[in-house]
Image: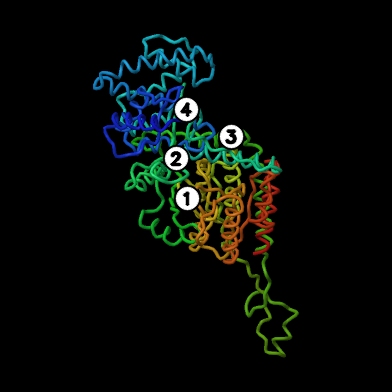
Amino acid sequence: MEIQDSEKRRAQNLIWNAAEDYSFTPDFKAYDENGRADLYWNSIIGAARRICGEAALHTLFSSFHGCLDESLYEQLVWLGLENAVYQREAARRPALPALRRSYARRVLALSRAAESDRLLDVLQEAHFRRALGQTPALRPRDQEILDALEFSGDLDGAALTEQALWFLRTYFGFVPVETQAREAEEEKKKRRVFSLRKRHRADLPAVRGFGYGFGEHILSEGGGKDASQPQRRITDLTAAQSEEALRAYIAAYFGTPLYPPRQVKALEDALCVDGHKGCHLYYAKGDAVLDPTVRGYAGSQRRAALKQMEKNRAAYEADSVRNRNSILRLTARIRNALMAYLQPTVIRSAVGTLDAGRIWRGVYLDDDKVFTRVMQSDPGTLCVDLLLDSSTSQLDRQETVAAQGYMIAESLTRCGVPVRVSSFCSLSGYTILTRYRDYFEKDQNQRIFHYFTTGCNRDGLAIRALCREMADAPCEHKLVILLSDAKPHDVNKLVDGPRLLEYADEAGIGNTAAEVRSLLYQDISVVCVFTGDDEDVPAAHTIYGRNFARIRSLDQFADTVGTLIQNQIRSL
């Protein structure tokens, strides 16, 4: 649809008038089915900016930018905002009720002609029937969705943002960052399947359908006065508040911080350099505490994480017999390897058990070492760090990964091997490392069931951060076991000199492989329990060499992981 410049200017003036601010370039303008500036909708858009604030609106619409259903989410959210803005503005703008009724009648006339049964069209028609005082005939589920969509005029900008995100999550399963990451993974799989012709998802056009008309959007590409600002993260409020707000959101979502801010800042200065420049770190305790003061979207995310923790435990108990047998077998495999590694050595000594065959050496050669002594190796010279990938790509394997992590940790604990268990993911530029148990917390393996997935995964930075912490490990020999699908992917770019590379595919795999090699150079053994798909096996080879094993069935878990650990113990 070609929109005339005169109509673009008119739409902008309508928005400015309603916003009572003429100093900005609107991100969005609305037109009717003939391409003319829509008087009612542009008034709503301008009023929404004044009521909600530019930052809240930008944050909200940026949250689902890039989704396959971005256009649907956008139109649904505008319907909800329209309801809230109208309730706030009707009393102070006498012309608004008449404009709304006129628009509603036009919607009903166009909907009768279209006869569409799409959910968006059904909800829009029903919403504007209500605006005319009519009672729409809706199925119970559709009525429930519409009731939730019609946001209250009592909400301010931040509350409207939280309400909109709650609505999209509850009824459409949308979670900021997670949904984009999951769809990106699915798209990568499709491209691999149809590799003869490289396929890319097309960006949405600047002018596209909006209701029964059109909406003009500022795209992120390009420059000039109509170019949009860089996309903000979901928790940004203003440029000055963004980092503080994001840290507060992460703390509410992931729970109590493990380290004080000053210590984290020192770790960031040391670790977030080179390819990870511009990234941040957050260390969480991995507890199951729900702060009752946390509300809104962060609170709903935290509650969803706690529910997943319950699912992890329930899934483990559902197969408790098999899982406990796996622990027994894995414990036996590890203990046998340790016994071989810790094989007692008989040495000659000046004290100990007399060796009759060597008495002559004492008489004729003045050799006092005619005794033997058994020297035992120190069983405390080995400790293990278990690192779980908790990114969205593991979403369908959460219960399985939690069970595998628990079984490995429990087996090592029974063998007297100090083990520390952590998970990692990345969210809006932060790599989050969650600590479930430390080396000598022998009774804390149950906390591994607190595992849940979200966001992306910057494997290289997570491994680098773990390596830094292992410097203080209480053992001479160190082993890292990763449970990973070998799919590094993060929204923050990889800094490669003057270039910025996508942290995915070759660049992400190469960076992760380099960080693994840095562990090996420090005599830290690294193995991977591979949880990915067939197409990711080459990536696992690149990162871990031969030191990885794929678990195709939990029935094979003990033998496969046992062999992997045995080989590493024998090579110490």
Say what secondary structure mark 2 lies in.
loop
Residue 288, labelled with which disc? Answer: 2
Locate residue 301, reporting x and y percent: 44, 36
Q: Are marks 3 and 2 in contact (CB under 8 Å)?
A: no
> In the orientation shown, which residue stands out farthest toward the left?
92
Which comes before the other along the chain, label 4 or label 3? 4
Tag in front: 4 or 2: 4
Q: CA distance from mark 1 to mark 2?
A: 20 Å
Which comes before the other along the chain, label 4 or label 1? 4
Which comes before the other along the chain, label 3 or label 2? 2
Q: State whether residue 426 is above or below residue 290.
A: below
Q: Residue at x 28, y 30 (%)?
A: 17
- The one of 519 and 147 positioned closer to us in this rendering: 147
- Report the side of 236 relative to 392 (left or right): left
Locate residue 293, reporting x and y percent: 33, 36
- Identify residue for label 1: 431
Q: Is residue 473 visible?
A: no
- The one of 373 and 262 positioned closer to us in this rendering: 262
Tag in front: 1 or 2: 1
Q: Are marks 1 and 2 in contact (CB under 8 Å)?
A: no
Tag in front: 3 or 1: 1
- The one of 506 and 207 positioned closer to us in this rendering: 207
Q: Amino acid at mark 4?
A: Thr
Q: CA distance from mark 3 to mark 2?
A: 18 Å
Q: Amino acid at mark 3?
A: Ala
